[in-house]
Every structure is written in structure tokens, then in C-alpha cells.
Amino acid sequence: MKPFIVVVFGLLLVTPVFGQHHFRKTAWGMTSAQVRAAEPSQFHGQKGDVLLFDVELFDARCLVSYSFVDDKLFRAGYVTDEYFMNEALYFDMYEKLRDAVAGKYGPPKQEVRYVPDAYKDDPGTGLVKGIVFYYAYWDLGDVEILLSVEGGDAAAHVSVEYTNKELKLEAERKARGNLDDQF
């Protein structure tokens, strides 16, 4: 039964970007109240303009995050919320997510796998030191997807973010305006 749940959940990961639902059961521009009502997972908490929910993805504890600008959903994604004693599991999860996204949208437009020679035999140590990282980027027109495995301070995480480009520009303008107010 568990493999079936993982497969079904993996399919939910790559819900249609174009159509009524853009990520899970949400759509870009929804309010935080609408997203909270639509998200079936257990509410984890709120940090500023970000709602967090508990989920399991590929047998790992993760958080689903929803980010808002002016109470409009502009970014959503998954991030691991579990420490793996075996750092290779972070790379395994990255590969599973990469395969799921690439299976739906094709190969990434850009991908970087940075592993210095000093860490070729032990990339996990480089990962938790913040030296080794992988990134993959998809450009789907009005939406971009960024998948990463990165770390530092003896920890690491895997994340995949879906971002609406138009609303992202609004968030960046707002952030610049807040910064301008400081100087």
C-alpha cells in the first residue's frame, strides 16, 4: 500500500501548471484564507507571508509552503523537514523529484551539479558544509520551477518551488520598495 501512496503523491507533485489548479489544489492569486481552506494537509504554521503544511513525499517528512504577496499566492513548493543521517538520501530525493518534474515538463532548461574535486568521493560531507549543491530550472512560460539540494551548518535540504513570474515581479517590486524605505 505504501508504494501506491508514494506514486499517487508523486503525481500530485506535478499537477498541471496551466489550468484551474496550478499547484496541488490551489491557483495563483488565491488568498491565504482560500489556500488554507483548499489544502488538505495538516497545518504546520505561518511565518510572515508563508503558510506551511505537513506532508510526506517519497517517504520523507516535508513541508508544503505557500508564499503570498499582498495576500495573493505567487509561489508554492515542497521542502524536506527531516534530517537524513545518510546524506546520500538528499541526492536520492533530488533525483526522484527531478525525474517527476522532467517526466511532466521535459528536461530542465538549466541544471548545475557542483561537486568540487575534494568532495568527489564524499559529496554528502560537502553538501552539509554548504559546498556541494545541485540545481535544476524549468521555464514554463508564466511559471518557473526551481529544484535544489543544498546545505550548510551541518544540515541539508531538498526543495522544489513553483513560482508565478508575474506575481514574482510584484513581490520583487514590493521588496525593493521596502528596502528603498530604509535608505
Image (cartoon, helix red, strand yellow):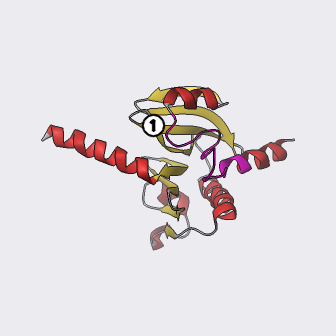
In the picture, residue 25 is in which quadrant?
top right
Residue occupying the far right of the picture: 1
List x then y, in percent, for residue 158: 55, 51
Query: Are there few (<14), some (14-19), or many (20+) residues within 10 Å of tag 1?
Result: many
- Nearest the viewer among 102 and 25 is 25
Query: Residue, x 78% and y 46% (percent of image)?
Result: 8
Query: Residue, x 48% and y 60% (percent of image)?
Result: 126
Does the rendering let one see residue 58?
Answer: no
> Does 183 lie within the magenta span?
no
Instruction: Tell me: 48 left or right of 177.
Output: right
Residue occupying the far bottom of the picture: 117
Which range is magenta?
11-30
- Nearest the viewer among 129 and 30 is 30
Is residue 17 depicted above or below 76 in this figure? below
Amino acid type, label 1: Lys
List x then y, in percent, for residue 91: 60, 58
Residue occupying the far front of the picture: 20
Q: Quadrant of the C terminus?
A: top left
Does the rendering let one see residue 78?
Answer: yes
> Does 26 lie within the magenta span?
yes
List x then y, in percent, for residue 166: 42, 51
Query: Residue, x 56% and y 29% (percent of image)?
Result: 34
Is residue 40 depicted above or below 127 in this figure? above
Query: Residue, x 62% and y 57% (percent of image)?
Result: 88
List x then y, in percent, for residue 37: 61, 26
Instruction: Tell me: 83 left or right of 40.
Output: left
Q: Which residue is mark 1?
A: 72
Secondary structure beneath dot 1 equals strand
Instruction: Tell me which secondary structure the magenta stretch mostly adopts.
Output: loop
